[in-house]
Image (cartoon, helix red, strand yellow):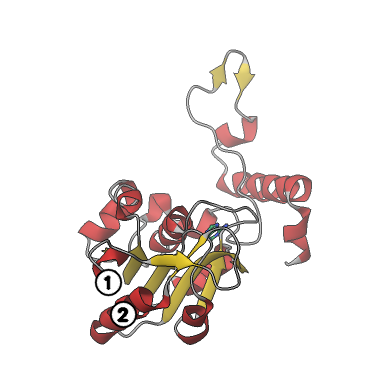
């Protein structure tokens, strides 16, 4: 899978994909992430990519021309399955969306800044708008990193058996059960006996119960969707 990201702050996206699972995905050739600096398509020598908004009001808006030129330039090389705009008024991101996007070949993600992007870009180029939560970030970069990370780890072959996504929280609309490691007794706080029993069937049952209980307590809304 290839993910191209258009941003005015490429520095913000250098580190998130350089470590751990996503780094391994890139090394295995399963994921390619390319960061494109929008200023390459700026209108003038000052690197202008934003301007005042029509109708007045505080805050700058990202101009249509640099964005259209960037998208068209990249789309000459790659047929994108989705052109995604990160925005707080987009569809709320969740595991189901991550699963669906992880099956795509090529994604283009546009990070907004300032007051947003000229709406004509959303109308004519963008095919999907994603929000990572009901709060406003200073730009779309951290949101794009979240989406890329959640998608990247689901690409077949990226995770091995040990880190398999099958048992992640949300995969079943259930939260994951509690986990423990050594020592079995830490400050007299004991690991649940059943996990030391060596009985895989009982352990599975216990984990399922714990998942259900946690979900009912913390996220009962997830159970409505089951
Ligand atoms: N840009 C700013 N806030 C955002 C959010 N919550 N989700 C996606 N992109 C954003």
**Is 204 or 13 nearer to us in this picture?**
13
- Label count reads 2
Q: Quadrant of ligand 1?
A: bottom right
Residue that mark 1 sits on? 41
Q: Is residue 202 above or below residue 127?
A: above
Query: Pointer 1: residues within 10 angstroms few (<14), some, or many (20+)?
Result: some
Q: Which of pointers 1 and 2 lies earlier in the amino acid sequence?
A: 1
Secondary structure of residue under mark 1: helix
Task: Residue 37: tell me if it is visible.
Answer: no
Q: Quadrant of the C terminus?
A: bottom right
Q: Is mark 1 in CB contact (under 8 Å) with mark 2?
A: yes
- Distance from label 1 to label 2 (Cα)? 7 Å
**Is 216 or 207 nearer to us in this picture?**
216
In this rendering, would 33 be left or right of 133?
left
Q: Is residue 130 above or below residue 217?
A: below
Task: Residue 180: tell me if it is visible.
Answer: yes
Classify mark 1 as within 8 Å of ligand 1 or not, answering yes or no: no
In this rendering, would 66 be left or right of 45?
right
Query: Pointer 2: residues within 10 angstroms few (<14), some, or many (20+)?
Result: some
Secondary structure of residue under mark 2: helix
Task: Point out residue 102 in the picture as x, y percentages from the top left corner.
Answer: 43, 70
Q: Residue at x 27, y 79 (%)?
A: 74
Residue that mark 2 sits on? 69
Task: Point out residue 177 in the picture as x, y percentages from the top left corner.
Answer: 62, 44
């Amino acid at each position: 899978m290839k993910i191209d990201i258009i941003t005015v702050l490429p520095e913000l996206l250098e580190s998130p994909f350089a470590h751990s699972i996503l780094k391994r995905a890139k090394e295995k050739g399963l994921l390619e992430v390319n960061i494109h600096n929008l200023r390459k398509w700026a209108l003038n020598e000052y690197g202008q990519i934003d301007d005042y908004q029509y109708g007045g009001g505080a805050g700058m808006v990202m101009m249509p021309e640099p964005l259209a030129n960037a998208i068209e330039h990249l789309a000459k090389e790659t047929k994108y399955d989705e052109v995604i705009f990160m925005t707080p008024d987009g569809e709320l991101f969740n595991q189901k969306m991550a699963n669906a996007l992880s099956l795509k070949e090529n994604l283009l993600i546009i990070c907004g800044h300032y007051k947003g992007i000229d709406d004509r870009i959303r109308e004519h180029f963008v095919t999907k708008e994603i929000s990572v939560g009901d709060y406003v970030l200073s730009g779309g970069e951290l949101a794009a990193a979240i989406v890329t990370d959640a998608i990247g780890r689901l690409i077949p072959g990226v995770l091995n058996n040990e880190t398999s996504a099958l048992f992640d929280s949300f995969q079943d609309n259930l939260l994951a059960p509690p986990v423990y490691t050594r020592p079995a007794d830490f400050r007299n706080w004991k690991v649940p006996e059943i996990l030391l029993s060596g009985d895989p069937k009982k352990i599975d049952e216990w984990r399922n119960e714990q998942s259900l209980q946690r979900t009912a307590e913390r996220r009962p809304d997830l159970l409505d969707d089951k």
